[in-house]
Amino acid sequence: MKKIIVLSACLILAFCQSGCVYVSTGHHSDRSDRAEKKRAEKKSRSDWRPEHVIFVGFDGLCAKSIRDGADMPTLRDLMAKGSYTLESRTILPSSSACDWASIFMGSGIELHGYTTWGSKAPDLEPRVVNENGRFPDIFWQYHKKNPDAEIGYIFEWDGMDFLTDPAATDFRLNTKDCTTAAVQYIKDKKPNLCGIIFDQPDGVGHNIGWRTPEYMAKILELDGALKQIMTALDEAGILKETVVIVTSDHGGIDKGHGAMSMDEMQRPLVFFGKNVKKGYVIEESTVVYDLAATMAWLLNVEPPQVWTGRPITSPFKTK
């Protein structure tokens, strides 16, 4: 009898333990599934962001030249397959150093202090400076958050060297052949953030005139450079994970710029690439300093409080 009782007790205990193990395993499995689901949802929410942002700037490219039918097949293709506006504005004055500084520093001259076309240092005391003693720009903000990211800066006009923080860039080159350098760099390093800034058609505008036949010929040549950059992104295998931004610092009229006419102040702004809406015309107001905020938003970087720029979000599909 005792043996029967003991045997029954053992069977009951084994059954209970088996049940407990089963219930416990199921509970952990549910918890694991929920955690995995949350991770997938979080990844899905952030998947719209690009891994690479390539900024291409053409000094002095005016919006009116595009409206007037400028022969730029590559740029027009990016406009048709991406999002764009021909009404993006400069700050005042509509001059090179002031506007390039604003593009990368997210603020106007009142805060970053670069006030003339050729400023090599702030003419006004900057409102704030970072740990390198410079007004914070998009390159440094991104480098701080992602120190292992590849960051490049390639430019033709030597004045560009004074407008971004050199401590932020892995590759920094002043060259008279931006195209060759940019193509090689993209293929070799697959940069996460890269600024490529040409010094034309500004030179032709000053020497011969804005929207002259020579000016229009120069922007067709620059369109060829843009095509080579797009091809390099494709051949590097990163085009599908890239947002390309094409713009300029200002326009021009006759043989100059810097004043308050729309021909001087309006500039093209084009977005193309990952999760960019196709054939979308940007209706919202945009200013040069909004570009730093937009690049920060695309790269998931918190903008500093001193920036006045707002991210241009309407061209992007984020869900």
Image: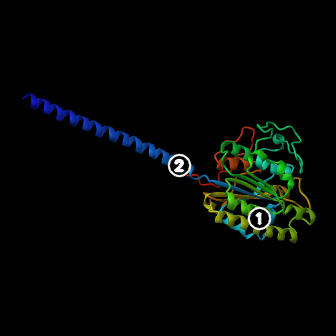
Q: Nearer the observer, disc 2 or disc 1? A: 1
Q: Position of residue 240 (x, y in %)?
A: 61, 61
Q: Is residue 69 above or below residue 249?
A: below
Crowding around mark 1 (Cα neighbors within 10 Å: few <14, some 14 to 19, many 20+) is: few
- Foreground residue among 66 and 175: 175
The residue beneath circle 1 is 180
Q: Quadrant of residue 81?
A: bottom right
Q: Is residue 188 above or below residue 46?
A: below
Q: Position of residue 196 (x, y in %)?
A: 76, 57
The amino acid on which the numbered mark 2 sits, given as a three-letter code, is Lys
- Foreground residue among 106 and 154: 154
The residue beneath circle 2 is 43
Q: Is residue 299 above or below residue 157?
A: above
At horizontal 63% and vertical 61% (from top left) the residue drawn is 239
Residue reaching furthest left?
1
Q: Earlier in the sequence, mark 2 or mark 1?
A: 2
Point out which mark residue 195 bears.
Answer: none
At horizontal 76% and vertical 69% (from top left) the residue drawn is 224
